[in-house]
Image: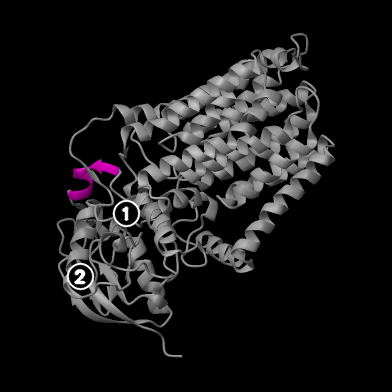
Amino acid sequence: MRDEKETGAKPARLIAVAAILAFVMAAAPFLKGALIIGKHEGDTLHLADIVLRMADYGQLPHLDFMTPLGILSVLPIVLFVKAGFGFGMAFAAAQALVAVLLFGPILRVALTRFAGWTAWAYTGFVISMILALVHGEAISALSISMHYNRWAWALAYIALPLAMLEPRGARRPWLDGALIGLAFAIMLTVKITYAVAFFPAVVLALLLRRDFKAILAALIFGLAVMAVMTGWLGVAYWQAYLRDLLAVANSSTRSAPGLPLPDVIASPAYLGGSMALLATVIFLRQSGRMTEGLVLLLLAPAFAYVTYQNFGNDPKWLVLSGLVALSLRPANTITNSLGWPLRQALLICGVIMLALSLPSVLNMAWSPLRLLADNRPDQVPLLSRSKQGKDVLITAARMYRVVTTQPADGPGEPYAAFADRYDMSSDEKKEGGNSDSEPFKLNGEALPICEMTTGYNALFETIADDLMQQGLKGKSVLVADLFSSLWLYGDFKPVEGGAPWYYSGTPGLAHADYVLVPLCPTNDIRRNDIMKAALKAGWQFDEVARSPIYLLFKPVPPKS
């Protein structure tokens, strides 16, 4: 009876509605029979590269190829591909599996940390976040990109309320501590940013609440997961994981894939939420919620950092902070020194944060239904040459209509006289595309300043067919570009030690049979960076073939 009184609904009713929501969202891709995406095809190729390396070749992240993502961010998808699913349905099944595994912990948080409608809102949001077919924001085009961010946020939404909020009813420290420890261990092997950013606040919360049993349980279960993974993958896995993370952190182009940190905090799109969060901290402490206010204050920079570090800079912390503000409102009689009624003050803060989160929340929640309603013609497989890739579709124009961008102020160009009027900053290079005002020279030949914006399938299919006709079947070809997905389009081997998404250095070069340099790549900054790094390390490149769209080289290692 206590749970019914405090949650405003029978637990059985909440469980039933949550199960129906999860089932509908999880079933939508299977009812459609395919995933139809509308953006981020490059990110999808990156994910497919990782998944199919693991499923078809038995490779492991960090040990066999470079990526900052932890193994559990892709392992559920890999398992379903190995079971015979297509890549698209394997992705959908993996999301359903994650929702099933986290269903109990989500309900534990909802029924013991929130009351009334906030328990329903919390449950619905976390389930929607796991099963969405878009990463967030307000752009409705579907995408399976950055699913690991949604999964990591879901884990954080389990660990943070369990740590910072007193349970509504009797404490169960061993259960709650175990869930916190497991959530952090999985976060560590999904995307480490979340675990590192939120760890100090969780430790402080449990210490302030004097929940020492929960701390012990979290340590036992968290370390147990780490021990199991170390027994499976070996100590070298963690060393390689750290190496990849440092490579990304030191990358000049991808250490932060969005807005600068000050903008994530104080630009017009984010300032309202930041101010509401700080006001919530103040009002909580004025109302006597000293522990919760202090923990939320420590979480504020963690929220900002995780948002800053993720592409799209979607502030998913708004829902949690808003629900915390609404759940911890004091009695009507409590005021601060200015005479403000703190119950109403926290209500305003909570409503502001929930309102600001609404575009992202609705975008994720409705995304499976948008998939079912998508009947646009002229859809083609993104992975047109892969037997597992027929169930991820995208508009043919995005994959086969080749659109490139080139500056028109270079030497001999119509606007050459204006080239000295500006100096591109590093941020402008990242946002604007073409990297240099002066062409990069390889073997004395200037490479075009050019980028491809659409037409990835046309690029990869043309190159793959050309190379196979030249007798390169079965070879490993490193593509000097943002992503090296050529092997998905022809009879080639993935480059051992390569990078499905390029960050820095020369990953895989030592194991590549050939290096292909696109004349108009998907990202000319990355093309130039990988070749500059190789030349700096002493590599030489002997040309073996060329076409109007690429140069092909045999890499010659540095003399020892």
Q: Quadrant of residue 16?
A: top right
Q: Quadrant of residue 254?
A: bottom left
Q: Could you tell whether 486 is left or right of 181 in the image?
A: left
Disc 1 packing (10 Å; few <14; some 14–19; many ≥20): many
Q: CA distance from mark 1 to mark 2?
A: 31 Å
Q: Confirm whether residue 495 shows in the render.
A: yes
Disc 2 packing (10 Å; few <14; some 14–19; many ≥20): some
Which stretch appears magenta? 392-400
Q: Which mark is residue 170?
A: none
The residue that appears at 58% across and 45% down in the rendered structure is: 305
Q: What SS does tag 2 mark?
A: helix
Q: Position of residue 555 (x, y in %)?
A: 33, 80
Q: What SS does tag 1 mark?
A: loop
**Figure quadrant of the N terminus:** top right
Q: Residue furthest bottom?
A: 560
Q: Could you tell whether 243 is left or right of 49 in the image?
A: right
Q: Position of residue 64 (x, y in %)?
A: 48, 67
Identify residue for label 1. 433
Work out whether 88 lies above or below 404.
Answer: above
Q: Which sits in the foreground, 111 or 539?
A: 111
Q: Could you tell whether 350 is left or right of 81 in the image?
A: right
Q: Which sits in the foreground, 272 or 294?
A: 294
Residue 398 drawn in magenta: yes
Residue type highlighted by circle 1 = Gly
Q: Position of residue 241 (x, y in %)?
A: 57, 62
Identify residue for label 2. 468
Residue type highlighted by circle 2 = Met
Q: Nearer the viewer, mark 1 or mark 2?
A: 2
Work out whether 497 lies above or below 125.
Answer: below
Work out whether 310 lies above or below 491.
Answer: above
**Disc nearer the start of the sequence (1/2):** 1
Residue 388 drawn in magenta: no
